[in-house]
Image: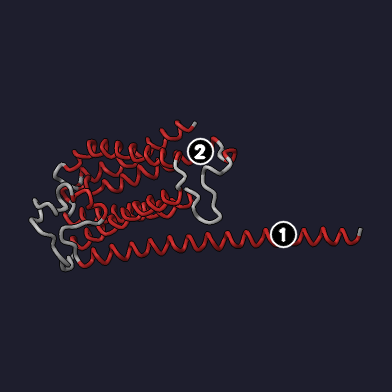
Amino acid sequence: MVWVSAGAALALAVVIILAVAIPIIVSRDSIDGKAVEYAEGVSKVVAAICIAILSLKVPKWLGVLPGVKSSKAKNAADLTLRSLAFNVGWNILREILEIGIFLIPYFIASNNAAVAIPGSGAIGLLIGLVVGAIVYVINKFTTQQLALAISMSFITGWLSTGLFTGGCHEFEEASTETPKVFRMPGDSVTGFWSHKKLPMALFKPFGYSYSPTVLMLCCFWLWAAGLCLLHALKIWKAKKNAANKQAEVNARVSTDLKADQLTAVVV
């Protein structure tokens, strides 16, 4: 049942992506060049929001928030086959559609950029499997859940911040670009510090730029500060809920104790 749900979700997502991509590819010659930058900006901002949500959920999933049990400590009987099939199918559908949104700029581009999609998709799948396997092994055998939660939240939060920064930069490139704050040494295209070639191109999704603009730096630090604030609010809320639950337990125990004492006196 789970595999059927996963296959159906994958097929539905592919159909939806093709239904959007084919009309775009057919009519892309009539699409203005700025539309590509706006589309790429929107796709990066959407991806940033999704990854930010993932970063916020990691501490809860690993059970490091006060009063929250990890997935290992939950009762497996609560996870029915139907709920598992739904969760697997829904998440596959959502993630594949996110990929589709991210690929829209490449569908619009008229320089055969879409040709690179299969190869890059295979590389991305391989990287995802390797990272997923590493996280699974670490989560299964490590006892340092807090360190794992902090590192995973930091990496995903950093990636979300970089994607949001890149998306906003696409918007300013399509309109009016703000002044450059500084430039790294060397050539902007072939130099070591260029974000268009390895190794620094690996850090571009995390917000790195050879010559960041005022808007890019503002977006980077504001988004990062907002994520840190949301993490702090989640911790505060978890502590408050845990304290309220403990107060309820203490009040219940106190009431039961008084009732027992009263019964003993009567007897």
Q: Nearer the viewer, residue 177 or 70?
A: 70
Question: Which residue lies at the image location 22% right of the left edge and 52% below the top edge?
Answer: 204
Question: Which residue lies at the image location 31% right of the left edge and 42% below the top edge?
Answer: 17
Residue 210 x/y as whole percent: 16, 58
Q: Which residue is denoted by mark 2 in the rendering?
A: 84
The mark that comes first in sequence, 1 or 2, is 2
Classify residue 100 as left or right of residue 250.
Answer: left
Image height check: is 153 above or below 236? above
Image height check: is 123 above or below 245? above
Classify residue 187 as left or right of residue 140.
Answer: left
Q: Which residue is denoted by mark 1 in the rendering?
A: 252
Give the amino acid at mark 1.
Arg
Tell me the tag on residue 209.
none
> Which picture quadrant has residue 107?
top left
Give the amino acid at mark 2.
Leu
Classify residue 243 as left or right of residue 171.
Answer: right
Nearest to viewer (mark 1 / mark 2): 1
Query: What count of labels does the image hold?
Result: 2
Question: Which residue lies at the image location 17% right of the left edge and 53% below the top edge?
Answer: 195
Q: Residue furthest front?
A: 143
Image height check: is 32 above or below 226? above
Q: Nearer the viewer, residue 248 or 14?
A: 248
Question: Which residue lies at the image location 53% right of the left edge and 56% below the top edge?
Answer: 66
Residue 135 x/y as whole percent: 39, 41
